Amino acid sequence: MAGVVPMLTYEEGPTALDWLVAAFGFAERERWLGEDGRLEHGEVDAFGGRIMLAAGNPHYEGPRAHREHCDAAARWHEEWPYVIDGVLVEVPDAETHLARAREHGAVILGGLEESPFGRLYRAEDPEGHRWMFLQPSA
């Protein structure tokens, strides 16, 4: 049982779930769609961790859409290429994971880095949520 489970909201939940599986190598665990086709609840296994996601109400907009009309959010994106309210996922091989994410159109926020914690990179998904992937030091 995981002690912390991130819960993310997406405008296009089913599309986001498919993309996260394809680009980041997560395994789909749950997909509950409403009568209108919106994702009411989704879960992925992220290399042993769990992440929940769902579509927001019809007025929700993801980080990418929000920064298109919010100057402050646009500045955060332009001036701070790091993870803001994002998710850190430990992966077995950061270089291979980065190549897969790039192949599926993830926005890469800087390349592979060596850090005191291990090899890592940062990425943004199509709706603008930011992720950090870390291959921990041995």
Image (cartoon, rainbow, N blue to C red):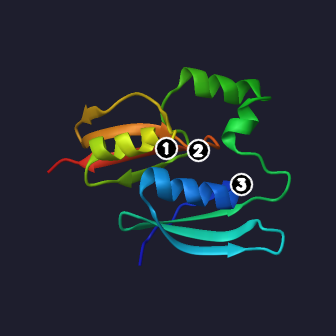
Q: Quadrant of the N terminus?
A: bottom left
The residue carrying pointer 2 sits among few (fewer than 14), some (14 to 19) or many (20 or more) residues within 10 Å by Cα, namely some
Q: Is residue 27 above or below residue 131?
A: below
- Foreground: disc 1 or disc 2: 1
Q: Residue at x 80, y 29 (%)?
A: 69
Q: Residue at x 44, y 38 (%)?
A: 102
Q: Quadrant of residue 72?
A: top right
Nearer-the-camera pick, 75 or 93: 93
Q: Is residue 6 above or below residue 64?
A: below
Residue 88 left/right relative to 73: left
Q: Count up the numbered dots.
A: 3
Residue at disc 1, secondary structure: loop
Mark 3 sits on what residue? 12
Residue 36 left/right relative to 21: right
Q: Earlier in the sequence, mark 2 or mark 3?
A: 3
Q: Is residue 124 above or below residue 138?
A: above
Q: Position of residue 14 (x, y in %)?
A: 66, 61
Mark 2 sits on what residue? 129
Q: Tell me how far mark 1 sits from mark 3, CA to CA.
A: 17 Å
Q: Residue at x 61, y 27 (%)?
A: 76
Residue 51 left/right relative to 74: left
Name the residue type under label 3: Glu
Mark 1 sits on what residue? 104
Name the residue type under label 2: His
Q: Position of residue 51 (x, y in %)?
A: 51, 64
- Foreground: disc 1 or disc 3: 1
Residue placed farthest to the bottom in the image? 1
Name the residue type under label 1: His
Residue 84 left/right relative to 90: right
